[in-house]
Image (cartoon, rainbow, N blue to C red):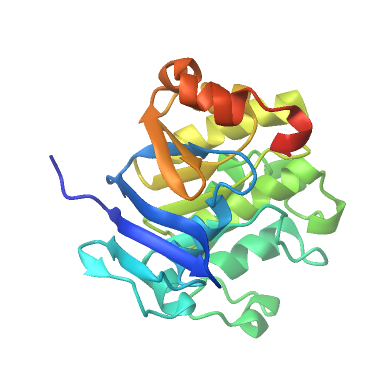
Amino acid sequence: MTQPLLELRQITVSFDGFLALRDLNLSLHPGELRAVIGPNGAGKTTFLDVITGKTAPTQGQVMFKGRSLVGTREHRIARLGIGRKFQSPRVFEKLTVQENLALAVTRPKQPWSLLLGGLNGEQRDRVHHLMGIVNLQSRADWAAGSLSHGQKQWLEIAMLVGQDPDLLLVDEPVAGLTDEETDLTADLLKSLAGNHTVLVIEHDMEFIRRLDSPVTVLHQGHVLCEGTMDQVQADPRVIEVYLGTTEEENG
């Protein structure tokens, strides 16, 4: 088996005595698509914060491409190939779809050159390819602020892909989306796996099922179980701590 792209080894995070994560172990291999579920308070956000360097573990190790990330600053972790999409879309609303994607594909970031048409042919091709991935070609000249919520989510995912990360961390991508948008988002993330490793956190069980990927269940900062969606849904522990709770509790 290939070496894991990402490994979390016995990660514990304590906030003034409260254990947000406790002895958490998880590994992802190159090209894998993985879903992570768990009730509110399970430690999902802290889990992402540890990977991206926003929160330092109290103990344990985070390995990416065989090197430790502990103590590495957030911007350096991003440059190593880890991209994160937050729950709410973070796009430049006054810029067009094309301009948002142009910012994503340029290195170093030089927005003044973009205003002067500073993209080379390869970068322009990349922008058009990204618009095709998320089906926004017809919205190329639209201001991002005029897009629907779902389209903004897709644009941000495309911007993330434009940075060419090895690992994409996607946090609740279908919150507030229509059923059709939810299905399209699942198809989009499935299409990105293989070329990228994709980790998705979500509450929507039908969306998770559509991903058709391994599922990791977090509970009280610890991995409760892992398996297919059918396996975790049938696990009595999962039914008790997560699937048996009300929608309001699940958020």
- Examine the rendered structure and indicate whether residue 147 appears above or below residue 116: above
Residue 125 in view in this figure: no
> Quadrant location of residue 165?
bottom left
Residue 126, position in %: x, y?
50, 56
- Examine the rendered structure and indicate whether residue 246 appears above or below residue 26: above
Residue drawn at (50%, 60%), measured in percent from left and top?
19
Q: Is residue 33 left or right of residue 148?
A: left
- Of 18 and 77, nearer the camera is 18
Quadrant of the rendering where the C terminus is positioned? top right
- Examine the rendered structure and indicate whether residue 210 appears above or below residue 168: above
Residue drawn at (68%, 27%), measured in percent from left and top?
245
- Of 126 and 78, nearer the camera is 78
Query: Residue farthest to the left?
Result: 1
Residue 27 in view in this figure: yes
> Quadrant location of residue 86?
bottom right
Q: In this view, does 51 lie to the left or right of 250?
A: left
- Of 210 and 147, nearer the camera is 210
Residue 8, position in %: x, y?
32, 56
Residue drawn at (72%, 54%), measured in percent from left and top?
88
Q: In this view, does 36 lie to the left or right of 2?
A: right
